[in-house]
Image: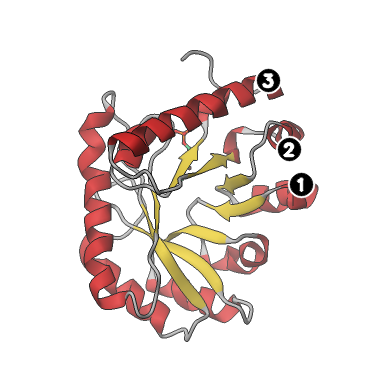
Amino acid sequence: MRVTEARIRDRLAAIRKDIAEALKRSGRVQDEVRILVATKYFEPDQISALASAGVNLLGENRAEDLARKQEMFGNAFEWHFIGHLQRRKVKEVVPRVNLIHSVDSVRLIRELGKRAPERGVNVLLQVNVSGEESKYGVSEDEVEALLEAAARTEGKVQVRGFMTIAPLVEEPEDVRYVFAKLKEIRDDLKKNWSGCFDLSELSMGMSNDYVVAVEEGASLVRIGRKIIEEGP
Ligand SMILES: *Cc1c(COP(=O)(O)O)cnc(C)c1O
């Protein structure tokens, strides 16, 4: 996929404008939303165009690709991991990223606790709000068990908040409930857990649905196709 720096700049400006308007509409005027660009569509030789276009936060889905791309462009970006993380890949991923968005099992949390550096590793818990079968993430009922597991790592696994992937639909309004629900889950858990974890991040919204996600409280949106595809 070829994409020029000018085009990336253009797309980013449009996305930033959408986000600013969504924040205003929802009364979130003090809030900031960070744009993460999903790198799974970009070959390594395309990534420098992202840096020159002003992107500073990237998210990769696969441990191998993360290693490859980060070794080439490590210092130009903050890196996050957004894909399904296997326990045997933890060792490779942890030293390369500032945040892992996709933590969804107690066993994975234990492994992260073992492999984290002294300062700890920052994670989001992935929640499957819609109950779609094909998606990773835990159900609402299982989230607290993950927080308990993270608390047992004694500061090694720092839960910063939650992530969800909404089902792909034609009409973004149809997944508004997913984002509203994730925020509700977070707000509820804050009552018991804010002494232990800050839980301030909500990673939700992709190319199709980021406007709705921001209206419902996203602090991080993860954008891929909208940066590269033709059209509005
Ligand atoms: C690919 C991907 C994205 C970006 O999706 P687009 O629909 O291309 O914007 C966001 N989050 C995750 C976890 C992804 O794998």
- The amino acid sitting under disc 3 is Ala
Q: Secondary structure at mark 2?
A: helix
Farthest residue, direction top: 231
User: Does residue 130 appear in this view?
Assistant: no
Is label 3 in a helix, a strand or a loop?
helix
Residue 56, numbered label = none
- Give how far apart the Cα atoms at labels 1 and 2 are: 9 Å
For label 1, the SS is helix
Residue drawn where x is 32% and y is 47% of the image: 217
The answer to which of 146 and 207 lies nearer the viewer is 207
Q: Mark 2 — residue?
A: 44
Q: Nearer the viewer, mark 3 or mark 1?
A: 3
Q: x, y percentage for residue 11? A: 55, 24
- Badge 2, how many Cα within 10 Å: few under 14, some, many 20+? some
Query: Mark 3 or mark 2, which has the lower sequence index?
Result: 3
In the rendered image, the residue lying farthest to the right is: 72
Q: Is residue 130 left or right of residue 85?
A: left
Q: How many marks?
A: 3
Report the residue marked by disc 1.
73
Marks 1 and 2, the one that precedes in the sequence? 2
Residue at 58% across, 67% down: 90
Image mark for residue 6: 3
In the rendered image, which quarter contains the N terminus? Answer: top right
Position of residue 2 in the picture relative to residue 83 (left or right): right
Amino acid type of the residue that numbered disc 2 sits on in the rendered structure: Pro
The residue positioned 65% from the left and 33% from the top of the image is: 42
> Would you say 230 lies left or right of 219 here?
right
